[in-house]
Image: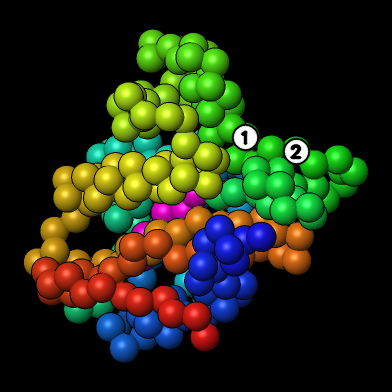
Amino acid sequence: MPEELFPGAQPQHLYHEMVRRLLAPLGFTAANTIACVGVCRDELTSSFVDGVQRLWGEAFNLGSLAGMAFLGRTGLAAAISHAPTGFDRQRFLFFALSHLGVGEDGEVGMCVRPGQNTPTPACGALIAFRKELLSGQVSLELDPEDLELSLLRRRLYPRLVDRPVPPLAELTELALEVTLEDLERAIALTVDPREADYAVFTGIQIHAPGGHLVWPGSSYAVIAGQRHPLALAKA
Ligand SMILES: [Zn+2]
């Protein structure tokens, strides 16, 4: 069950409200902040984006398959150039999430989607990659006809050599870790902390039988160049 796999996972709407409450005293408002959201392309993740947009306005899309942040320096430069102007500082709110289905019977990686009767994989990209790992057949070539999955393999595979293939939940956490690294690299290349404050929220969106949950990962704000950890404790 999700709570055992990811202690601290909470209903998605409560997560969004906690983010808002943490950021209000730090000066982030819907009027002065641009939200940027990195989630998998899977339509199951769209409720997360909707929740962000309800509180923060229209969000820039950072995500690729599995929520990986492949947008690079140019992509992030575009996002931050769209921030509201006319305020004392620019403010950016970044979300990076991996995702995972949990079926009615507790099966990790499967969920029944609206309009379907049988469970399908989520995250499909991570499950496809894990199957390749189990088969021992992983190509690190850049495939122009499958760009995002080939980039995902190239980012994750070096972390997985000389160790057993991890269970899906662990692979999902690894994908999140690498996504955060890529996002932080793009931030370092584009954001000037002398002029802008920003916050980073990471986590895993869990598609559970009772609804979407969010397990909060590393989260922090950088205010006037100073990093402040942000704890998303269960309400
Ligand atoms: Zn996915």
Quickly name the residue at label 1: 124
- The image shows residue 26, relative to residue 222, as above or below, that is below
Residue 60 visible in the snapshot: no
Q: Is residue 171 left or right of residue 102?
A: left
Circle 2 residues within 10 Å: few <14, some 14–19, many ≥20? some
Residue at left offset 30%, top offset 38% = 72
* Residue 3 percent coordinates (x, y): 59, 66
Mark 1 vs ligand 1: CB under 8 Å?
A: yes
Magenta segment, principal secondary structure? strand
Gap between marks 1 and 2 measured at Cα = 8 Å
Image colouring:
rainbow
Q: Which mark is residue 174?
A: none
Amino acid carrying label 1: it is Gly
The range drawn in magenta is 93-98
Q: Which mark is residue 120?
A: 2
- The image shows residue 75, relative to residue 164, as above or below, that is below
Quarter of image, res 195: bottom left
Q: Is residue 1 left or right of residue 175?
A: right
